């Protein structure tokens, strides 16, 4: 009799457990039933916006619901990240993160307003794209080695531009200076456009930038490329050497990824992850991202979680060493 009663209790508990999980399972199966908002933390037209809109377009088709882009710019992506982190964890607000928002800002800003690990559920790693060192065509250095030698012989004589304090190009520049043991004055700009104009105008000799905005000017001869910050050469510009060919092991890439607010049901995260991975395998998507100087990544949410943890630790160490802080 005791065995029968124990078995009945076990079956009842199992039934209740399944019953409590059923709404989440049903929700995941019916998701999405209305439009989804994708928060992009930078203004329209920039690399983050362009990359994010490719994903939004494809997700709309895959999910049969419109994915509406909401540009929430400000504080190097912090404004959009805070808005996304505070959204309902129901899968109807997603966040298009950058290496800045989810690798750099939490250490660079005294109060970024969010925690990239605690406040977000990783969905999928979208792309990785190297930064690039460019100079004015009249600049005497024509290689990375020549730039290092020139800077070592003239500490703090030269200045370099980057599109924003704490941006991945800025941090790539700081990492480069530290690795090379040189002193170059950093000049922050509000975006790639103004910075590129000043470099092309001869007002500032060096710039660290993303490939998409710099490449048209390189091809037109208005800028000279010295090196890319990936470990391997970029397929769309194989003639440009890597910085690692001069400084072995050097790597400082930008990257984009998709996140949901923490607490979003696992069934929804997994469904989004599966759809995004299918999208990233589409030849036209690979081609469009390659045109932006990016390589598609994909993989499970755990891969993205590991990436965020590694990036936060990496940049925190550099920020501590250089004593950089932004209010």
Image (cartoon, helix red, strand yellow):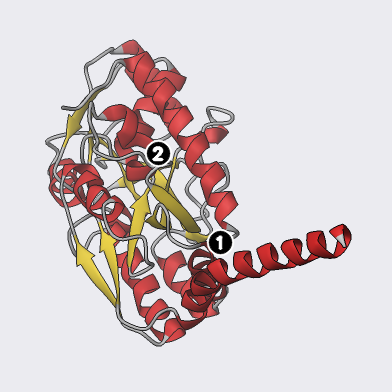
Percent across and percent down for residue 281 are 57, 73
Query: From the viewer's perspective, is residue 214 above or below residue 179?
Result: below
Q: Quadrant of the N terminus?
A: bottom right
The foreground one among 201 and 22 is 22
Query: SS at mark 1?
Result: loop
**Is residue 214 shown left or right of residue 269?**
left
Q: Residue at x 19, y 27 (%)?
A: 326
Give the residue number, with chain letter if any, for mark 1.
298
Q: Is residue 99 shown left or right of residue 16? A: left
Residue at (17%, 53%) from the top-left corner? 73
Q: Quadrant of the C terminus?
A: top left
In front of the other: 16 or 160: 16
Q: What numbered label is drawn on residue 103?
A: 2
Residue in the image at 41% along x and 41% along y:
118
x%, y% of residue 93?
Answer: 31, 65
Label 2: state its secondary structure: helix
Question: Would residue 65 be found to the left or right of residue 186 on screen?
Answer: right
């Amino acid at each position: 009799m005791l065995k029968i009663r124990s078995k009945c209790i076990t079956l009842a508990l199992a039934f209740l457990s399944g019953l409590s999980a059923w709404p989440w399972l049903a929700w995941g199966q019916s998701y999405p039933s209305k439009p989804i908002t994708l928060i992009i933390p930078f203004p329209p037209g920039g690399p983050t916006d362009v990359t994010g809109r490719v994903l939004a377009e494809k997700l709309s088709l895959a999910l049969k619901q419109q994915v509406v882009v909401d540009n929430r710019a400000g504080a190097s992506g912090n404004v959009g990240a805070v808005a996304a982190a505070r959204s309902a964890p129901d899968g109807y607000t997603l966040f298009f993160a950058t290496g800045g928002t989810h690798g750099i800002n939490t250490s660079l800003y005294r109060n970024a307003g969010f925690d990239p690990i605690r406040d977000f559920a990783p969905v999928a790693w979208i792309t990785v794209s190297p930064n690039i060192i460019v100079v004015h065509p009249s600049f005497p250095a024509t290689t990375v080695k020549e730039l290092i030698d020139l800077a070592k012989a003239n500490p703090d004589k030269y200045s370099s531009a980057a599109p924003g304090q704490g941006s991945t190009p800025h941090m790539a520049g700081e990492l480069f200076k530290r690795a090379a043991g040189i002193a170059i004055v950093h000049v922050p700009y509000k975006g790639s456009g103004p910075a590129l104009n000043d470099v092309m105008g001869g007002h500032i000799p060096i710039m660290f930038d993303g490939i998409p905005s710099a490449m048209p000017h390189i091809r037109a001869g208005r800028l000279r490329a010295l090196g890319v910050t990936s470990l391997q050469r970029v397929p769309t510009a194989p003639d440009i050497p890597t910085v690692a060919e001069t400084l072995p092991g050097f790597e400082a890439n930008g990257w984009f990824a998709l996140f949901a607010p923490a607490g979003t049901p696992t069934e929804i995260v997994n469904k989004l992850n599966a759809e995004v991975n299918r999208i990233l395998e589409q030849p036209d998507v690979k081609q469009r991202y390659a045109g932006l100087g990016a390589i598609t990544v994909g993989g499970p949410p755990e891969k993205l979680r590991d990436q965020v943890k590694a990036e936060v630790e990496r940049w925190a160490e550099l920020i501590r060493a250089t004593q950089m802080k932004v209010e």
